């Protein structure tokens, strides 16, 4: 699974992207975020407030209950500020 | 048409290209967003725009398609820049062309309001106290909500 981080979340976590192999029971975005938060204090800090985390799976916005699989590209980022 | 690019754009040339050969157009509304030198009370030296390549284009295309479904547009254009920009630099161009001005104004307004809350861009400002990610504004969300369908 490819996981991308952008903006404030990337700054906090310290890397722009990772290729990860989470346990089989990590089957939704929510489960992935919970699993990521256990990987270190920088993940716990970056993802502590779900209200300011936006999620895309395969470049489409999704909610926390969206299913994910090992071939997916998951992006986590702060609310957008373009324009 | 949508474009995501590092380079600047020429508003006059883009307008000419948008309307060329399309003689049903009665009016074009353009919005050009610029980098300000102030954020609240703080002076901004420059900003860097980050985006999500691939998703950005997909979102901008979806926003443009939505505008064409809502208004009778002959043509439209979204250009959004990324990379480091300084105060006064152009960030974004949105244009909507229609037989009549009302649709052109409304569609242009819709395009920029929706883009601001949906397209995956982020601004990192250079301030006297160091770099700072710009927070999303509740006023931008409110502006976008005006265009939600009942």
Image (cartoon, coloured by chain):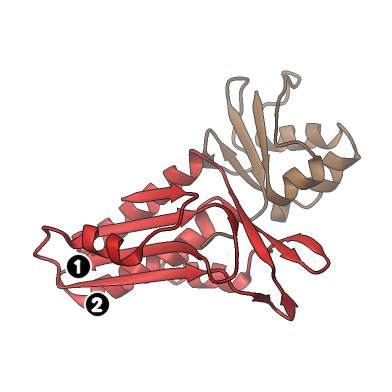
Chain colours: A brown, B red
Please state if A61 lies on the left or on the right of B136 as rendered: left
**Pointer 1: residues within 10 angstroms few (<14), some, or many (20+)?**
many
Q: Kindly indicate the quadrant of the structure image that contains residue B40.
A: bottom right
Q: Nearer the viewer, residue A56 or A14?
A: A14
Q: Which residue is mark 1?
A: B98
In the orientation shown, which residue stands out farthest toward the right? A41
Residue B3, percent from left and from top? 39, 49
Query: In this orientation, does residue B150 appear?
Result: no
Residue B91, percent from left and from top? 50, 62
Q: Is residue A33 above or below residue B150?
A: above
Query: In this orientation, does residue B19 appear?
Result: yes
Q: Which residue is mark 2?
A: B102
What's the residue at 43%, 43% (across, down)? B58
What's the residue at 86%, 41% (across, down)? A42
Residue B93, percent from left and from top? 40, 63
Q: Kindly indicate the quadrant of the structure image that contains residue B43.
A: bottom right
User: Circle 1 marks a residue in which chain?
Assistant: B
User: What number of labels is visible?
Assistant: 2
* Inter-mark Cα distance, 1 to 2: 8 Å
What's the residue at 55%, 67% (across, down)? B141
Q: Is residue B16 above or below residue B105?
A: above
Residue A15, percent from left and from top? 76, 36
What's the residue at 62%, 70% (across, down)? B138
Q: Nearer the viewer, residue B25 or B129?
A: B129
Q: Look at the numbered discs 1 and 2 and tell me whether their residues touch, using CB distance below 8 Å.
A: yes
């Amino acid at each position: 699974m490819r996981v991308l981080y952008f903006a404030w979340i990337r700054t906090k976590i310290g890397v722009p992207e990772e290729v990860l192999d989470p346990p089989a029971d990590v089957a939704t975005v929510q489960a992935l975020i919970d699993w990521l938060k256990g990987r270190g204090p920088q993940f716990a800090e970056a993802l502590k407030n779900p209200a300011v985390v936006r999620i895309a799976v395969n470049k489409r916005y999704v909610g926390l209950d969206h299913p994910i699989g090992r071939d997916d590209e998951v992006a986590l980022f702060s609310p957008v500020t373009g324009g | 048409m949508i474009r995501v690019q590092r380079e600047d754009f020429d508003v006059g040339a883009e307008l000419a290209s948008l309307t060329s050969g399309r003689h049903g157009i009665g009016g074009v509304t353009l919005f050009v967003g610029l980098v300000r030198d102030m954020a609240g009370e703080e002076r901004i030296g420059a900003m860097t725009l980050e985006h999500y390549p691939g998703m950005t284009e997909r979102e901008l295309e979806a926003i443009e398609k939505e505008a064409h479904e809502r208004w009778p547009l002959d043509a439209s254009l979204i250009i959004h820049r990324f990379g480091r920009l300084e105060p006064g630099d152009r960030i974004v161009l949105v244009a909507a062309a229609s037989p009549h001005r009302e649709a052109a104004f409304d569609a242009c307004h819709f395009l920029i309001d929706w883009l601001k809350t949906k397209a995956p861009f982020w601004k990192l400002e250079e301030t006297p106290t160091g770099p700072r990610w710009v927070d999303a504004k509740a006023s931008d969300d409110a502006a976008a909500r005006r265009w939600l369908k009942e």
